[in-house]
Image (spheres, rainbow, N blue to C red):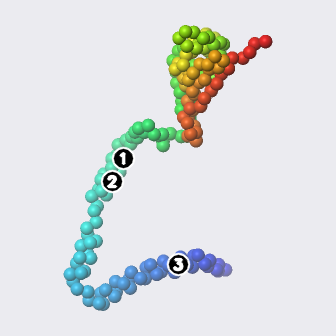
Amino acid sequence: MKRPLCPTSLTLSVVFILMVAVPAGAQKQTKGAQAPKQQATTANEGENNIDVSQIDQILKGEEKVFEGGTFTYNPAGRRDPFVSLAEGVQESKQRSERPPGLPGMLIDELRLEGIVQTPQGTIAFVQGRDKLSYILRAGTKLYDGEVEKVLPDEVVFKQQVNDPKALKPYRTVVRRIAEKK
């Protein structure tokens, strides 16, 4: 049973036949017209003036890779395209050893205990995951961010976020003192 040709495949077949047939017919006409030899030699010279020097460099580079040469990538501040977006930077940081004390604490691991006004500025008291108390000032570095500002009733953190879809590489986290009854 034969299938009928669809219009697009028929059109493509006709175009392909024309592409093959027209250059062959054009060559026959130039041979029959006995074009001057000078014009024929300039046309052949134009074909021979193709620059192939870069092809050799590319092939040599491929040979080095196949011989065991390693490929290195310098991101220079850009995202590494060979690292999966599904794995976040924060996850890899959490797997590694954290520094002791406050620089090793995540923002989510801190519990705000109190805020005090001093002549040098406002400071906050927090309790860490190790059940020790720490003092926070504006600019204090934490494992996944830093303290942006300490206000009389809240502390504002700037938390680093590894989300390729996010417009900013950080998000603002605000912690308020819970009123005790």
Q: Position of residue 87 (x, y in %)?
A: 56, 36
Residue 130's quadrant in the figure?
A: top right
CB-based contact (under 8 Å), mark 3 and mark 2: no
Residue 63 drawn at (x, y percent): 33, 50
Give the spatial CA distance, label 3 vs label 2: 36 Å
**Three-letter code for the amino acid on which mark 1 is drawn:** Val
- N-terminal label among 1 and 2: 2
**Residue that carries the numbered disc 1 in the rendered image:** 65
Labelled pair 1, 3 in contact (Cβ < 8 Å): no
Disc 2: which residue:
58
In the rendered structure, are the residues bearing label 1 and label 2 in contact, judged by CB atoms less than 8 Å apart?
no
- Image position, residue 140 (x, y; %): 53, 18
Compared with residue 10, is residue 125 higher up or lower down, i.e. above or below?
A: above
Density class for disc 3 (Cα within 10 Å; few <14, some 14-19, many ≥20) is: few
Q: Which residue is identified by label 3?
A: 13
Residue 63 visible in the current orientation: no
Amino acid at dot 3: Ser
Q: Nearer the viewer, residue 145 or 84?
A: 145
